[in-house]
């Protein structure tokens, strides 16, 4: 039973790491990256659809994102959705595709994006610590109910702490990489 609890703990922490990676992918850097549009929803036949499900998105040049919709009638909707998403982009519609020129980031914008990344990282570290706290509470309950011994509780708590430290270290490394990505020109 304690093994199951620790495995679930690690699984939840791995999901948190995946969430961090997704969140970091949406923070733009100075380079064109199609994943910055992942959160953009387009009104399509009365229902909101993720942009990547109704169009192919590519970055053929370092400062250019190209959106080619599968259905050309949705071009205006895509253009509007990109503007409404408030990503700092100005889409240009040529009747076939939408081109988005990614502006170079100013020093201040870069610092703001780093701040945003640090906040995301910290929020996710808190989520990991909350998972650790919940798991240790479950283990203490097992010890109280005499399912595991006091020594076993200590050993399992140390295991949980090691898993927690490993995941927090991973978040720190991801943050460091993202900071370098944002600050490099």
Image: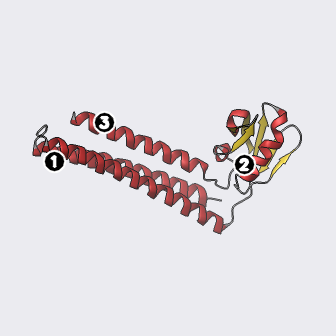
Label 2 – label 1 distance at C-alpha: 52 Å
Name which of mark 2 and mark 3 comes first in the sequence.
Answer: 3
The colour style of the image is secondary structure
Q: Does residue 60 appear anywhere in the picture?
A: yes
Q: Is residue 172 left or right of residue 164?
A: right
Q: Depth-wise, is mark 2 or mark 3 nearer the camera? A: 3
Name which of mark 2 and mark 1 comes first in the sequence.
Answer: 2
Pick whichever, 117 or 139, lies toward us. Answer: 139
Callout 2: 10 Å neighbours few (<14), some, many (20+)? few
Q: Residue at x 79, y 48 (%)?
A: 80
Q: Does residue 64 appear anywhere in the picture?
A: no
* Mark 1 lies on residue: 154
Task: Tell me the SS state at disc 3.
Answer: helix
**How far across and down, in percent of the image, does residue 33 sit?**
67, 46
* Mark 2 lies on residue: 62
Pick whichever, 49 or 168, lies toward us. Answer: 49
* Mark 3 lies on residue: 7
Q: Residue at x 78, y 35 (%)?
A: 69
Label 3 – label 1 distance at C-alpha: 17 Å
């Amino acid at each position: 039973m304690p093994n199951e609890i620790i495995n679930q703990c690690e699984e939840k922490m791995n999901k948190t790491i995946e969430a961090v990676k997704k969140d970091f992918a949406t923070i733009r850097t100075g380079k064109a990256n199609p994943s910055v549009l992942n959160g953009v929803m387009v009104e399509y036949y009365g229902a909101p659809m993720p942009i990547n499900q109704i169009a192919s998105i590519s970055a053929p040049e370092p400062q250019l994102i190209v959106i080619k919709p599968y259905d050309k009638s949705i071009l205006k909707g895509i253009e509007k959705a990109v503007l409404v998403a408030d990503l700092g982009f100005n889409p240009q519609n040529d009747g076939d595709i939408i081109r988005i020129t990614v502006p170079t980031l100013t020093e201040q914008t870069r610092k703001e994006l780093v701040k945003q990344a640090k906040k995301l990282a910290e929020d996710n570290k808190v989520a990991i610590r909350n998972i650790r706290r919940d798991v240790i509470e479950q283990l203490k309950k097992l010890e109280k109910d005499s399912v595991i011994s006091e020594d076993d509780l200590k050993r399992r708590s140390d295991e949980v702490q090691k898993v927690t430290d490993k995941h927090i270290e991973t978040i720190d490394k991801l943050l460091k990489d993202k900071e370098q990505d944002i600050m490099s020109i």
